[in-house]
Image (cartoon, grey):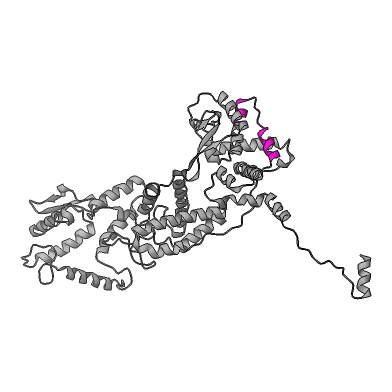
Amino acid sequence: MAGLQFGDLDWRTGRLAVCGKGRRADWLPLPQAVGAALLRYLRRAKFGKSRLIPLHPTVVAALQRYLALRGRQAVLDDQVFLSAGNRRIAPSTISDTFHQVLHLAEIPRDQPPRPRIHVLRHTVATRALEQCATRREAVARHVVALATYPGPRGHRRYVLVSGGDTGAAGGDGHVHRGPGRQGGGMTPIAPLITDFLREHLPLTQGVSPPTCDTSAHAFRLLFTVASARLGCRPSQPQLEPLDAALILAFLGHLEQQRGNTPPTRNSRLTAIKAFMRSVELRVPGALAQAGQLHAIPRKRYGQALVRHLSLVEIRALLNAPDVTTRLGIRDRAMLHLGFAGGRRVSELVGLPLDHLSLRPPPSIRVTGKGRRGRCLPLWTATAADLRAWLAVRGAVPAPELFVNAGGTAMTRAGFEYVLAKHARAAAATCPSLQGRSVGPQQLRHSCAVIMLQATRDIRKVALWLDHADLRTTEMYLRVDPTEKLEAVEAVSPPSLRRGRFTAPDASIAALLDRE
């Protein structure tokens, strides 16, 4: 049957146009009582929506047989389907008939999820989406048709059913799984993640955009691993399968397959725990699951000594750029500010031009981690290199202080390239730099160690580096041996009684003399 149209229904003559096999058109007699009942059914559907429903050829054949039997009896009721007593069927009778059919089909009734007659309605929708083409246009047409065929208020419940586990959705809109998985409602995770990244983090907690991007990347990796383990698309995981076992497997994947360090692994775990704290308020049924995830501990790891450059190596590095060229002047000023100011790479390449003041005393305004703004004074030599760069910088559209050869803002990768290039050049005059990899963070560490050796005050180092916690700055105490040497010299060693070893017999004494 190609599909029921308005023109296929002739209510005046009581006929229904049917197109069967071989595209042969025929008129199906439609009794007046049946037509009136069908019209009332279409007009009195749920929520008062009226619609025409096309009939499959098998349904037409079944209706023809039933109507033929119905027409042989004197029926006064205008309902299409009647009971054995030719009366209107009660809902309980429909349910009993459905369970009798289940028994004849040998479908168990007691195993969860328990079959209901409403499952037939959802089965039609899910099977229609399964059998349609995978192109976006075909799926869109089927979704629109489903929105008018069964008459739901929304079609999202059928779109969220995965192809590998097409359990029917219950009346509450939740998907009920097959016998192979646990029954019960499943919570779509997509709206929860959207609310967490777009509203909870930036609006409720006021988190900075870089932190939001880091959390979004963590969940991008998590959904990739979860979809591979659950056999679904990355956009289809539910909240319930994200249990402690899956999260631990994801953390293991980060370290083993991706080669992430324990600090990165702990950062991803922190993002997941923050998400579960927001879920606790919206999905109270996930409190037990959230408690299991919160119980996953952070991984402890050994902390190696930070790598830094000595003052001789810093001098060789800053002398490497060719200050007779425009880019050489830029590189000298950029490397000098990165070392003298102890700036992070993001703070250095993103420093706006209007945040630099060369009036006495020269200084820069910096916004560090936690969006803490502060004013940092500059060394005289650093200010001189910055003046030389401003003299040749020229008028460029980029608002940042340091720009590349194309006039756009310097990137982190660009800064790393410049640093590595001049480190290789400095190795010609400083043998200790030969074969050594110099990263941007080493400039910051070098500033901290040299300042600690000069001031002997860890609080001043923490203030210069913008550390919120003094315990973070204590790692430089382990690098600098000066404090330890002073502690050793300040303690007087205890006076010990001296003695001489005496051999107990002549044979041992002969061995000692031979040595």
Q: Is the stretch drawn in magenta largely helix, strand or loop? A: helix
Question: Where is residue 511, by image quadrant?
Answer: bottom right
Q: Is residue 29 visible?
A: no
In this view, the residue in front, 120 or 343, is 343
Q: Is residue 355 left or right of residue 460?
A: left
Residue 384 % position (x, y) = 61, 28
> In the picture, which quadrant includes the C terminus?
bottom right
* Residue at the spot 69% in from the left edge and 40% down from the top edge: 311
Q: Is residue 58 visible?
A: yes
Residue 471 % position (x, y) = 56, 53
In this view, the residue in front, 502 or 188, is 502
In this view, the residue in front, 54 or 205, is 205
Magenta span contains residue 325: yes
Residue 419 % position (x, y) = 62, 37
* Residue at the spot 17% in from the left edge and 64% down from the top edge: 65
Q: Residue furthest bottom?
A: 505
Q: Is residue 129 above or below residue 384?
A: below
Q: Is residue 105 left or right of residue 200?
A: left
Residue 100 % position (x, y) = 24, 73
- Find the magenta span and give its range: 311-331
Question: Where is residue 441, by image quadrant?
Answer: top right
Q: Is residue 495 above or below residue 262?
A: below
